Structure formats: C-alpha cells, structure tokens
Amino acid sequence: MRKPVRKAVIPAAGYGTRFLPISKAVPKEMLPLVDKPVIQYVVEEAVASGITDILMIISRSKRAIEEHFHPAFDLEAELTTKGRGEELEALRTLQSMARIHFVWQPKMGGLGDAILYARDHVGDEPFAVLLGDTVVNSNTDKPVTRQLADVVEKHGGSAVALQQVPPEKVSRYGILGGQEIEPGLIRANTFVEKPKAEEAPSNLAVSARYVLSPGIFEHLLKTPPGKGGELQLTDAMASLMAEETLHGLRYDGARHDIGNKLDFIKANIHFGLQRGDIAPALKEYLKTLV
Ligand code: G1P
C-alpha cells in the first residue's frame, strides 16, 4: 500500500524581482486577487487536494505571509463585538484550513535549495510542491495537485503538471520529454531546465505543481548548481529518474503566474468575473473600455 500524499511544501522565498518596486516590502504571494492573497488560493488548492499539513519556505520581507495565516485574536474579538459574523467566519476558515508551518531559506539558492529546507519536515513520504506565486485552475472537479497525487498513489515515483507552450517560450520552463502511456499521462525519459528551443525534447512545460517522492532529497544533496548558478529542482528530478519513475500529467485548465504583471492583471479580471458580488458591474466597466 503506497503512502497517501498528506503534506505540501509551498516555496515563497523568492525576491519577486519581476514585480519591483511593489515586491520590495510586499511579498508577491500576498498580492490580492480580488480580496484574497494569491497564496491563499494556493493553500485552498492544497486543502481541496487532501493536504492536511503545509510547510511554507519564506525569507526576509515575507513575514506578511506568516501573519496572514496566524490567528488574530484581537481582530476576532473586535468582529465579535461588532456582530460582523461573515468576516469572522472568513478569518476562522482561513486558520482552520490546514496545519501551516514556516521555515526560512537564508539565501536565494534556487528552487532546489528551497525544497531542501523541507527535508526534515517531510520525512519519508511523498509530498506536493505548489509554487506560491502561481494559481492553477483545473477545468475539472479535481484540483491539479489532487490529480498528481492520484498518479503517484497509483504508479509510485513522482509526477509533475504539464502545459503545452509555444516554441519561443520553452526556454522559460522545465521541459519534459517521454512517452504518452495513456491520454495526457507521459512517462518521462528526459527532463531539462530551461532548454533552448532547438534543444528541447518537447514543448511540455512544468507548470508550478509537483508531487515528489522523498527520494528527491538525496538527489538534491548531490546535484551541482545548474541554470543561473542555482540548485535546480529539475536537475535533481532528472537524476532521480534513473531510480524511480517520473510522470508528467497534461492538465486541462489555466495557470496564472502572479510574478508576472500582465498575468496578475488578467487574473484579477478572471477572478473578479467569477464573483457574483462584483461581476455584473465589472462586466459593464470592461465593455466601456473596448
Ligand atoms: C520554475 C522551475 C521551472 C518551471 C517553472 C514554472 O522556474 O524551475 O522548471 O517550469 O518554475 O513552474 P522559475 O519560474 O522559478 O524560474
């Protein structure tokens, strides 16, 4: 019987240089999509996927993330006194979603380095990784992290979420090559971090969600720095692939990378249009712009 996926790691330590100056003091993960920070959508996806324990990897200037998920007894007392039941409920739901822990990544050594800080916490069980600046919407009832956990609980090894990207964009992503064993499920035989378009094994890009075998930690420890002089998770996964299977799952849905200004604005419109309280007025406003 394979171990279920109960734990998740959310890396949220990066500088967010693509979003300066706002990201100097405000973590990009705390930017709002309507009235919730990006990272709350990420936590909600994890919880809807069956995750009960979350470790966030943070750094200097990311304390607002801790505060967001920490109980605020004074604020709760104030809301109780004022009879603001709905807001009180929203705060309490936020704190009861999962057990949330934090660890600091002292220097920016790459995604692989960030994941290594989760080693003791994760122990010997498969775990999900959800990048804290990216919201992924599945077009089906199952969140993408749950779909990956299903693959790992069935086949063992690790699994990553994939999206097709145009050739001119492959050099921005981890690219996976392999054989499609059933519709949308690829057994990987190559995994390369940010290859040149002409050297890429496919146009299937890793898309901010992973479920990893704990075997990854041994490989991270022996993987040398890769692209950009950083310890790349992709390189350690390529090394792990010699021992355990890696599957890629092409999912049906949308990805909003909030570290990117245009995507951030589009995501706010997207989520705004899904919110009954503001959608009609927002639609009317958008019509006046075109
Ligand atoms: C990271 C990973 C890359 C992946 C991307 C999007 O890159 O290293 O393999 O495709 O996230 O999930 P970054 O965007 O942090 O440079």
Image (cartoon, rainbow, N blue to C red):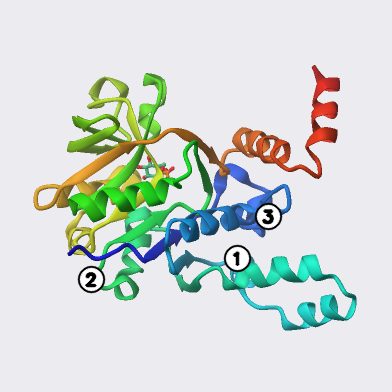
In this view, 80 is above or below 165: below
Q: Are marks 1 and 2 in contact (CB under 8 Å)?
A: no
On-image quarter of the N terminus: bottom left
The residue lying at 58 percent from left, 73 percent from top is 96
Q: Nearer the viewer, mark 1 or mark 2?
A: 2
Q: Position of residue 258 (x, y in %)?
A: 58, 43
Q: CA distance from mark 3 to mark 1?
A: 12 Å
> Which quadrant would residue 113 be assigned to in this image?
bottom left
* Amino acid type at image mark 1: Ile
Q: Sequence order check: which comes first, mark 1 or mark 2?
A: 1
Q: Position of residue 183 (x, y in %)?
A: 27, 29
The residue lying at 35 percent from left, 44 percent from top is 228
Taking 234 as reference, is 15 left or right?
right
Q: CA distance from mark 3 to mark 2?
A: 33 Å
> Which quadrant would residue 75 be assigned to in this image?
bottom right
Q: Nearer the viewer, residue 16 or 164?
A: 164
In this view, 168 is above or below 45: above
The residue lying at 30 percent from left, 70 percent from top is 119
Label 1: element kind: helix
- How many neighbours does mark 1 have within 10 angstroms: few (below 14), some (14-19), or many (20 or more)? many
Q: Is residue 280 visible?
A: yes
Instruction: Spot the residue most to the left.
Output: 243
Res 124 label: 2
Instruction: Spot the residue most to the right.
Output: 82
The residue lying at 61 percent from left, 44 percent from top is 19
- Look at mark 3 in the image and give the residue it sits on: 36
* Amino acid type at image mark 2: Asp
Res 138 label: none
- Look at mark 1 in the image and give the residue it sits on: 65
